[in-house]
Image: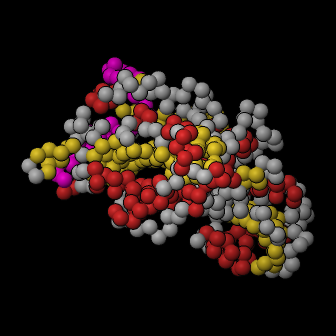
Amino acid sequence: MLFSKTFIPILKNNPSEAVIKSHQLMLRVGMIKQSSAGIYSWLPLGFKVMKKIEQIVREEQNKIGAQEILMPTIQSSEIWKESGRYEDYGEEMLRIQDRQNREMLYGPTNEELITDIFRSSIKSYKSLPQLLYHIQWKFRDELRPRFGIMRCREFYMKDAYSFDLNDDDAKFSYNKFFLSYLRTFKRLDLSAIPMAADTGPIGGNLSHEFVILAETGESKIYTDKRIFEVSSENTKLDKKSLSNLREKYEKFYAVTDEKFDKKKFEENVPKEFRLNTKGIEVGHIFYFGDKYSKPMSASVDFQGKKEFVKMGSYGVGVSRLVGAIIEAKYDDKNEVMKWPISIAPYECSIIPLINKNDNSNLDKAHNIYNYLKGKNIDTIVDDTDENFSSKIKKFNLIGIPFQIMIGKKSEGDLFEFVEVGKEAKNLSIEDIAKIIINKKK
């Protein structure tokens, strides 16, 4: 890809309307463009990052046996009236009417719709458990949308739903998602801590938020610092292993502000390990038993009688994760974005020093590009006439982890190679490719 042919509308300065660094960066490097209050168009750079995050989320859902479906954004009000949530949900729900005056809504979540799908399709307990997920746009009519995509009205989300015969099996499903989320956030190079949380309008009595530490976060969190030492490595997908994993985390006090109890915090956490700070929610899981299955008659036949299935729901804000990762990784002082290579918009940039009467460096850049492309390394060539330092600054801002400079310091078959944040080296293109490929593993 040639930079001159990309649609990356970069601004010279941070937009005045942006307050937090994720909003500033996403507008400045042309990842998004505001369409209306709290609603954004995703431009090629931002869309590419979001789709890479989506794929990691999808892969980790598939690993625990969840099956992907796709539900519509527009839902009938009738199923929400069945569950009893239509009037209770509040003004965040966008209610609309079609031309036949039927009451419809733009889905803020999908508990009702997935329950309706389940009850019409599954009749026997022998078909349980069922773990279903989809990745789709949601809409919540925020009163005060702010902070760019971090607090917007339309957002891209993975939501999953589990259906089980009894509480014990349902908690096994809950723990599968608990592990899946830990693995997902680790692949995104985030330290996300599971914290006991309020269930809110979704309901139920068991819930965990997955929170990353960030000064710009809206959630207040109270935790024991030792929780950061807990590891989910080598955890197997069996009941005992998953239960043990949750117990390891729940041994340490970790709650969001809705669950905070000052007395318990001080009793359970030694002073030197207390942490009271802010964080960003990047995932939320709920177990709510038969809250939806009972009023909506979602049951299975078990030993000659009907049993209402036990359900849970599991959300990850895919679009929100783009902003959360920027908040965690962007060095605003030096204007360097450090994307994990797994989701970087490009893995490598080639920056040739271009002379008006000499195309040799640009020809070398094209040859290197074709070689890296053959190695499945996502690469961009800067063929613009900007000066060297401006190009480097631009790619640091965009957040491309590896850079190849073709200029005065290049000698023969050796090229100046930089991993952002480290010293430059003169290496052959073969050695450069090996480094990038190993980093991707």
- Furthest toward the top, the residue is 101
Answer with the quarter of the image where residue 221 lies.
top right
Q: Position of residue 431 (x, y in %)?
A: 72, 79
Is 67 placed above or below 143 here? below
Quadrant location of the N terminus in the rendered image: bottom right
Is 258 placed above or below 98 here? below
At x 24%, y 37%, the residue is: 294
Is 342 placed above or below 193 here? below
Name the side, left or right, on which 249 lies relative to 49: left
At x 50%, y 39%, the residue is: 259
Name the side, left or right, on which 283 lies relative to 7: left
Name the side, left or right, on which 45 lies relative to 258: right
Q: Position of residue 120 (x, y in %)?
A: 22, 42
State which region is magenta. Answer: 96-125
Q: Position of residue 27 (x, y in %)?
A: 70, 40
- Furthest toward the left, the residue is 304
Q: Position of residue 258 (x, y in %)?
A: 51, 36
Closer to the camera in the image, 317 or 88: 88
Res 304 visible: yes
At x 64%, y 68%, the residue is: 377
Res 1 visible: no
Is 417 placed above or below 192 here? below
